[in-house]
Image (spheres, rainbow, N blue to C red):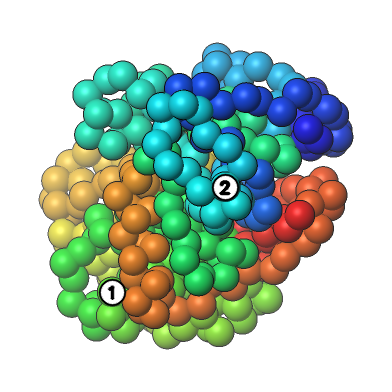
Amino acid sequence: MDLWATVEYGKPLEKIQQPIPEPKGKEVLVKVTHCGVCHSDVHFWEGYFDMGGGKKLQMADRGAKLPFAHGHEILGNIVKAGPDAGEQPAGARRMVYPWLGCGECRRCAREEDNMCANQRSLGAVQNGGFAEYVLVPEPKYLVDPGDLDPAVACTFSCSGITTLNAVTKLMPMDPEEPVVLIGAGGLGLAAISVLKSYGHKNIISVDLGDDKLEAAKKAGATAVVNSSGANPAKDIMAAAEGPVLAVIDFVNISKTAAMVQTILAKGAKWVQVGIMGGSVDISLAGTVMKATTILGNLTGNLENLRELTRIAKEGKLPPLPVSTMPWDEVNKAMDMLREGKATGRLVLVK
Ligand code: NAD
């Protein structure tokens, strides 16, 4: 099979060949037709995460062995299944849940694979959707998108479930209270749709680019703030008419985290999603005195994928902005994302 592989971290992906895997036991082989390109693919491809204070978490220490294909927003057609996988109709279209754990621990048994300490995620440490085929360990990781647009449904596996998981951390919430979303990229725009599916009415989208903010308005943001101004905190509080009770930071760098602390009202929730790196000083007494809840959010679980699919099939999820590109333009898509030139989610189509 062909795969667009990372052969050396930080170098253009190369089209290489590997044997098509043969499904054994409960495994299912899926031929990829659609794969979203996430900013996490850029971090994975760089080969490390910036953990702040000059520390780096190397992908090689997380079990990644090059060469392999990134890409974790995977949708495709079932090709064949192992002898213990049960009836798996060849040709059926399925979304693939990529955030695999070890498959053996209590977290995995509870379908909280994304919380497993021993990740073997598709597209992060083993072949994902930038390959022609992916091998899925069990049929339970496949979800039927029905008649949903496959270019949109593929994005549920990461941007969809991550934002669903982050939004549910804020709930229950008065729909008129402002929610501030920092970053209006793939995740930030998906979060607007997810919030609207919850009936939320007051959504403030923040980004450095007017084109991104235009897309946020189209997606249903009630107000937008360009944070490249001299005093973004003041501008956000003006849009919110005061300090806010809820922030989701899809950028989450030292600068945005320092700014977030200045806009939080008493009792606010601050959900951190972006992994663009850095660190920040947090006043411990200040956290207590403002009764702040700080929550990290790592992707979502299988139930999140099933739930988002249900919401979308019921017609309750406003359209997610995606643009499609040919599968062979993966390097272009990765460059666009890295350089901040992508508006909405880019989806590779074979
Ligand atoms: P993206 O590139 O599509 O969007 C990022 C957006 O942030 C862009 O619109 C950009 O203009 C904006 N931005 C950059 N710097 C900014 C700043 N200082 N202030 C305001 N806006 C700024 O990226 P994405 O795919 O939406 O991913 C966003 C982040 O979330 C990445 O770090 C990604 O790895 C991470 N992520 C985390 C999880 C998780 O489970 N926690 C899951 C998926 C992605």
Left or right position of 162 against 244:
right
Q: Which residue is mark 2?
A: 90
Residue occupying the point 27% across, 47% down:
294
Which is nearer the eye, 323 or 96? Answer: 96
Quarter occupied by the C terminus: bottom right
Q: Is residue 284 left or right of residue 184?
A: left
Between 220 and 259, the one lying in front of the other is 220
Relative to residue 2, is residue 291 depicted above or below?
below
Instruction: List x then y, in percent, for residue 250.
Output: 48, 55
Disc 2 residue lies near ligand 1 with CB under 8 A? no
Residue topped by disc 1: 198
Instruction: Report whether 174 appears left or right of 8.
Output: left
Name the residue: 81% across, 58% down.
Answer: 326
Camera-side residue of 248 and 241: 248
For the residues labelled 1 and 2, the Cα–Cα distance comes to 35 Å
Disc 1 to disc 2: CB gap under 8 Å: no
What residue is at 78 percent from the left and 32 percent from the top?
A: 1
- Which residue is found at the position 40% from the left and 36% from the top? 86
Q: Mark 2 packing: few (<14 Cα in 10 Å), some, or many (20+)?
A: few
Can residue 305 be seen?
yes
The first of marks 1 and 2 along the sequence is 2
The crowding category of the residue bearing disc 1, from other C-alpha atoms within 10 Å (few below 14, some 14 to 19, many at least 20), is some
Q: Position of residue 186 (x, y in %)?
A: 57, 61
Residue 250 is labelled as: none
User: In this picture, is 44 found above or below 264?
Assistant: above
